[in-house]
Amino acid sequence: MNLSFRTKVNLRVLYDLAIVGAGIVGLAHALAAAQIGKRVLVVERDAQANGASIRNFGFVTVSGQAAGNCWEMARRSRDVWAEVAQAADIPVLHRGLLVTARRPQSEAVIDAFLKTDMGEECRRLTGDEARAQCPALSPGVTAALLSPHELRVESREALPRLARWLAEAHGVEFMWQTHVHARSATGLETSRGAIEAEAVIICPGADATSLYPQRFEPFGITPCKLQMLRIQPKKPMTLGSAVMSDLGLARYHGYADLPQGRALGQLLDTEQAAQRANGVHLIAVQSADGSLVIGDSHHYGDTDPFSRADIDSLILEELDAVLDLGGYDVTERWTGIYPVAQGRWRLTDAPDATTRIVMVTAGCGASTGFAIGEETIAEMFG
């Protein structure tokens, strides 16, 4: 899809808002600003979004997000995703989530979660009930949490369609393949010249060094590398919803922060030590062609761009314990990078009254970005 909506700066235009970064967080801010009538320009260094926003599951996750503000923003963002998907002709490939359990300790986490406010509208299934929902589940699955809240899009297709829709339906302008050198007194200095804007929002993804690097230093931003795969089952099958496993119950904060979740984590440290040491947990989602996107792993600190076969094997080992697919081929492998900050899931900083830096620091940008955008725009322009 050709996304070269704009190739040079019109120096006569004064924008209400210039946004640096066309990932999901940047596009979410563009939508929120355009909806209140602001003239918006999005500046992106690549030809389209190529970072964490497309190197993911396209899985808008609600259940399992950390209790409080993160979970609430995920609920709101899911609603916006549903509206935007319909308006922008972005297919929702499936809805809902099955979090499977193969241990009594995992079932205890599910029971405890259902007693929290976040368990509203979710329910527990027996193993047989779960297999009726998803026939490919293995016999080892003894129970499952069924959440109705989630939805899944194909990220690599959804982000370009979202950008196109913002341009066509909301008048948002885009400058692709344009590097931003600095925030100036009147807007931005870029590789294509000066941009005049009343306000600027920087959505840098995992880049904490290009703009305002000194503002990031107190937060200890660390890159997190993940590995993911696409597999093609040899026999046609329908997943029906996203699927997660016991490992997710000990990793996602909405479950893992419960006393039962901490106990499960201690057990898994022994029973699945290799997966835990490499931050592996299972998410499986299905694409329109029947293939499954599978992941993922987590490695922190100094990272490299290379996938490791042993990590892929750990992911696939958990897949095989949860889903009986009757054989499959691995058709794609890739890595992604997102930023992490100790003790916080997002960062919003204000270098001055008309500038904001917005970074999601927990790998949940697709699940929370639209609500963050609404909040930032209301604070700046409300």
Image (spheres, grey):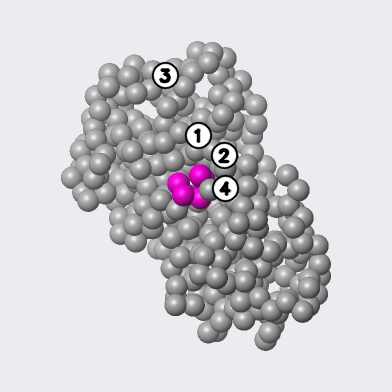
Counting residues from the start of the chain, the first of labels 1 and 4 encountered is: 4
The structure residue drawn at horizontal position 41% and vertical position 36%, both measured from the top left corner, is 95
Q: Note whether residue 47 is visible.
A: yes
- Badge 3 vs badge 4, beta-carbon distance below 8 Å: no
In this rendered view, identify the residue nearer to me: 367 or 314: 367
Residues packed near mark 3 inside 10 Å, few (<14), some (14 to 19) or many (20 plus): some
x, y percent for residue 336: 60, 47
Residue 272: x and y in percent read 40, 33
Q: Which residue is mark 2?
A: 154
Whichever of callouts 3 and 4 sits on the residue coming sooner in the sequence is: 4
Whether the residues at callouts 1 and 3 have beta carbons within 8 Å, the answer is no
Q: Residue at x 56, y 55 (%)?
A: 24
The residue tagged 4 is: 88
The front one of 378 and 363 is 378
Tell whether position 27 is magenta. Answer: no
The quadrant holding residue 351 is bottom right
Q: Principal SS element in the magenta part? A: helix
The residue beneath circle 1 is 93
The answer to whether any part of residue 278 appears in the image is no
Q: Which residue is mark 3?
A: 136
| Residue 89 point in image, percent of width and height | 57, 43
How packed mark 2 is, by other alpha carbons closer than 10 Å (few <14, some 14-19, many 20 or more), is: many
